[in-house]
Structures are given as structure tokens and as C-alpha cells.
Amino acid sequence: MANNHEMVTVGNTVVRLTAGRYKDNKRAIITVEGSFRYWLDGQNPTTALGHLASDGQVIKLESKDEMTKFRAIRDQAADATIQVSYYNQHGEPQGW
């Protein structure tokens, strides 16, 4: 069961997940509304470089390191939104 969550707007400047929200959690599930580019290595993506996330896609982060290093920026004129649920368990979250 998720023990915290947040909604983040992905605009024309690079955004990160909120450290005060993921705290000591071990995993996160991100649902994408819109499209954007992202990296999981702490580097800043651009509108042309980075993994492309599309509307309806689910991104699974499997460590605190990935949550800490997640960076995203929109890839088109419109902002995107991500819905994030955080989990602090070693087993598989429901639907993982």
C-alpha cells in the first residue's frame, strides 16, 4: 500500500520529485498525463534528449537512488502532469 503521494507539473524547466515526500521509501510508481523527457541518472534532460514518457505510461522507480536522481522536462508546448505514489516495502507493491 502506498504511504505517500504527490502530483508534479512537468513544465519548461527541469523538475525533480519532492524529497520530503519520498523520504525513506524504496519504490515509486509514476503515471504520466501528457508527455515529457526524463533521465534517472541525475542529469538534466532537454526537450530533445532523454527517455520519452507518453500519456498513460507508467514509470516504475525501484530504488531511493532512482527517486533522488529522477529529472523531467516537457517535450512539447504543453505541460505534463505526473501522479506519483511512494512505497516503503521490500516486496512487490500491488500491480507492480
Image (cartoon, rainbow, N blue to C red):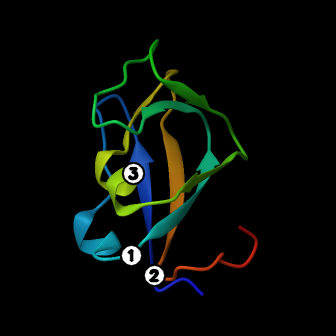
Q: In the image, residue 81 lies at what x, y percent?
A: 52, 49
Q: Between 81 and 44, which is closer to the camera in this rendering?
A: 44
Callout 1: helix, strand or loop? loop
Disc 3 target residue: 66
Q: Residue at x 31, y 73 (%)?
A: 21
Distance from the alpha carbon under mark 1 to that under mark 3? 11 Å
Disc 2 target residue: 88
Q: Residue at x 31, y 45 (%)?
A: 69
Disc 1 target residue: 25
14 with respect to 5 (left or right): left
Instruction: Name the quadrant containing residue 34.
Output: top right
Callout 2: helix, strand or loop? loop
80 with respect to 18 (left or right): right
**Reading the chain from its start, which is encountered first: label 3 or label 2?**
3
Proximity of marks 1 and 3: CB atoms separated by less than 8 Å: no
Q: Residue at x 29, y 34 (%)?
A: 14
